[in-house]
Structures are given as structure tokens and as C-alpha cells.
Amino acid sequence: MLRFAYVNGRYVRHADATVHIEDRGLMFGDAVYEVCQVAQGFLVDMTRHLDRLDRSLSQIRIRPPMPRAALVGIMREVLRRNRVVNGLVYVQVSRGVARRDHVFPTPDVRASLIVTAKSLNPATIAAKHAAGVSAFTAPDNRWGRVDIKTVGLLPNVLARQQAKEAGGYEAIFVDAEGNVTEGAATNLWIVDKAGTLVTRPADPGILRGITRTTLLDVAATLGLPVAERRFSVAEMLEAREVFITGATTICLPIVSIDGRTIANGHPGIIAQKIRDAFFDVAEKTAI
């Protein structure tokens, strides 16, 4: 099936989509992005995703390319053209096209906008949930503002590739003090020995994940105790459960870290409860 994309005012075939060679997203990584889950024909947590996009744009001083209502209309049209019922929609905004120079271009340069979408097979994701995945730790060598969702993801790419080559699904970043920050493309949670859900506070050292935020709502709905605090690799390895959260996988159990089995080596019941309740609690916007 043909795929389609939106690039700076035009809907084009995905295979034909291009950006200018002096787009600042390409030259400098001077761009931000969002990925929004699509499930059963609904955009999931769209408002929170677009609020975070606005925050990211504000933090690096890029003017929004258009009003939110217009952007939502483009997202819906891209999803419709790609016939996505279950999958994701990707939105990227760069500072625009200008002669290569580190300083910002003149104010008349308009931001660039790319929107793409693709389908995902729910059965494939369900199989990962049922079996769990493995992960490997890596030193957190990213810049100090990972709370801004920029396209500058080279440390994440290298860490995830290293995890893949070792047979893992995700890389888990560890700070200089030996505390867990987050996954290379996810937020990370443990269920500690007391049965409390624990995740690192949303400081500038992690991305405030939208799925993470909604999971806090889910935990409150289910009456699960939650603590936002730092925790060490040693505590993670001794946890009852470890799982990662992200827009496309929601709540994915980790059953092995650095070759060491977590708990009994099987996905835990807390992750299952959260995943079962997530869609009912999350915001759903019809495509």
C-alpha cells in the first residue's frame, strides 16, 4: 500500500518526500518532534502530546508553524491517507530553511513541518508484552536538557544499537551516581520490594513521557502506590517488576537486564493491570 506524508504545505507520496539540504533540522538537529499513538481509530493522549510539542518549541524558541487546530487537521488527513487504525503519527518541526549559520535565521524564516504515519500490528506488540523483553545498561552521556524532545538522539541511537547487538530490546541509561534515568526511547519503572511503583522524578534528566504521565493517572485509578524518586541499578535488579513505557508499547515488561533475570523471569501482574486499564483512562480523540 502507498504511504503518504505531509511536508511544508503538501501531501506527497512517502517515497517522494524531501526536505531542503539547508533545513536546520538536518544541519544542526535544530528541531523537535512528537509521536502519538493511534489505537482502534483514536489518537491517544493527543492533547498532552501537543502541549508537550508547544513546550519543546517554546524551550528552543521556535514559533509554531500553524495554529493547533490546523495541525490536528493535517494529522488526521495523514492518518486517513495512510489508512492507519492502529499505529502512530509522527510530527516534526524544525526552525526552517536558511543559509548554514549557527545563530538563528531572520524572523521571516518559517518553521518547517513534517507529518508522517504508519500502521503497527497489535499482535506483534502483544507478543512482546506476553514474553517480556531484555535490556542492557549504558552510561548516560546525553546533553543536560533531555526534557526537551529534540531530534538530537545520537547517544540514544548508539546505546540502543549496542543493546541490540547484545541481544536486547532497550538500553537503560545510568547517571554518574549509578542511578537509573530512563530508557533510550522510553521511561523506566520498577515495582520495589514493598510493592510500590517507582519512577525517576521528571527533572531535566529525563523526558516527561506522555505515557508516563497517563500511567500516573492509571495508577491512581487502580489504587496503586507510586513514588517518584531516584533508584540505583542494584535496586532495579532486585525489583519485583521492571517495565518501560512509551507511546507505541504502553507498558512493556523487562525480564532480563545485563543478562540477569528479573524476579521469576516472567512479566509481572502490575504491568498487566496497568496495560489492561490504560486505554480506558487515556484521552481518546477520534480520527
Image (cartoon, rainbow, N blue to C red):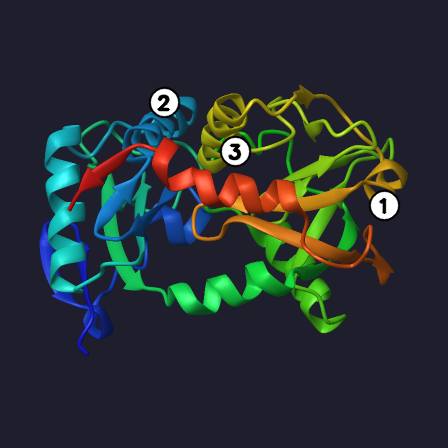
Side of 90 relative to 102 (left or right): left
Q: Residue furthest bottom?
A: 1
Mark on residue 212? 3
- Amino acid marked by disc 3: Arg
Within the image, what quadrant is residue 267 found in?
Answer: bottom right
Residue situated in front as seen by the camera: 253 or 173: 253
Residue 132 in view, yes or no: yes
Tell me how far mark 1 sits from mark 2, CA to CA: 38 Å
Q: Which mark is residue 91?
A: none
Instruction: Name the residue: 76% across, 70% down.
Output: 166
Which numbered disc flags the more N-terminal residue, 1 or 3? 3
Of the pair 57 and 235, the residue shown nearer to us: 235
User: Disc number at residue 58?
Assistant: 2
Q: How many marks?
A: 3
Q: Is residue 11 above or below residue 76?
A: below
Task: Residue under label 1, please give it.
Answer: 237
In the image, residue 230 sits, relative to residue 46, either above or below, namely: above
| Amino acid tagged 1 | Leu
The N terminus, quarter of image:
bottom left
